[in-house]
Amino acid sequence: MEAGIVGLPNVGKSTLFNAITSSGAAQAANYPFCTIEPNEGIVSVPDDRLRRISALIVPKKLVPAVLKLVDIAGIVKGASEGEGLGNKFLSHIRQVDAILQVVRCFEDPDVIHVSGKVDPLSDIDTIETELMLADLEALETSLQKANRTAKSGDKEAKLRAAAIEKCLAHLSAELPLRKLVLDDAEAKAIASFGLLTAKPILFVANVDETDLEGKGPLVMKVREHAAKIGASVVPVCAKLEAEIAELEESERGEMLASVGLAQPALTVLAQEAYRTLGLQSYFTAGEKEVRAWTVPVGATAPQAAGVIHTDFEKGFIRAEVYTLADLETYKSEKEIRAAGKLRVEGKSYIMQDGDICHFLFNT
């Protein structure tokens, strides 16, 4: 699963990407297309539960969950019609599973805004409009093909055409597809299209150092908009986070304390991006390692086992499961067993965020 960082030019996307991947701070550039090919980075998802588990089951190493981030070049008005190499950039977005939209919520006369003024809602509308126009074009082209195939009596093509028409009607009402309810068959019929406005979205409000909590008027506008569409907002000062990322680990705490932060905003961002992707973690714990494994919300125990190795899913017998609360209460897995708190779950078990598991399987 991966998330794409998008936004207008000069909103701080690349600075944010470089900070969150600890690859160094980028200098703000007063030209639109400083990112031509999408940069990719693997980001650890901070999770204090790893530390708490390892305090009682002491391992040789800790392995956090990770997610993939893609830094996609700035989108401008007219991108859906090819402006600013728009079609190429939009194709990069089709390949990701969720969108992290960076919205500029700071004033700086030295960093030119592509529209000449800082207006986060206008920026959001520009991006959403371009994504909707791109989806309309892709669906209209696909509908022609589906209708031709449907004439031969192909049932799948008929279903696909009906699903496409449903999407087109929704988009024509100027509504993004993430708010459209499709049944499983309809969703499967159009899954390969990579529709842009169907992807979940998280807004990243890029603030200045005087508004680290994101309580200023510009961020509040973004929060109000996000609340209306069921999205979340994370305020981040990309410039500050880039500076923190360049420091040695031992120096970061002092820097954070000096600006009144308990932890880097990027920690919150990584966690919220993980949630936006519809992901959760379960853990395995032993002397070799304590590790967080990533599964979609709603995954079954066999599917979770398959994340470790495909043979685990194929030969799944059962899962032995306990919670971090159990571990902190009884102090060891042995005592959890003795207290009868170790649960045995079968193939239909739906994994819960934070489960600590052993899987039994046949090879």
Image (cartoon, grey):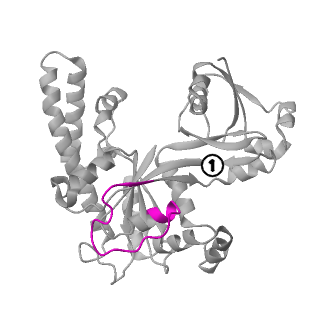
Give the farthest residue toward the top: 153
Residue range highlighted in magenta: 17-40
Residue depicted at x 33% and y 74%: 29
In the image, residue 316 lies at what x, y percent? 63, 21
Magenta residue check for 38: yes
Residue depicted at x 62% and y 18%: 315
Q: Is residue 78 left or right of residue 309?
A: left
The prevailing secondary structure element of the residues shown in magenta is loop
Nearer-the-camera pick, 308 or 145: 308
> Is 247 situated above or below 267?
below
> Is 113 situated above or below 189?
below
Magenta residue check for 360: no
Residue depicted at x 58% and y 67%: 264
* Pointer 1 residue: 64
In the image, residue 238 lies at what x, y percent? 46, 70
Q: Secondary structure at mark 1?
A: loop
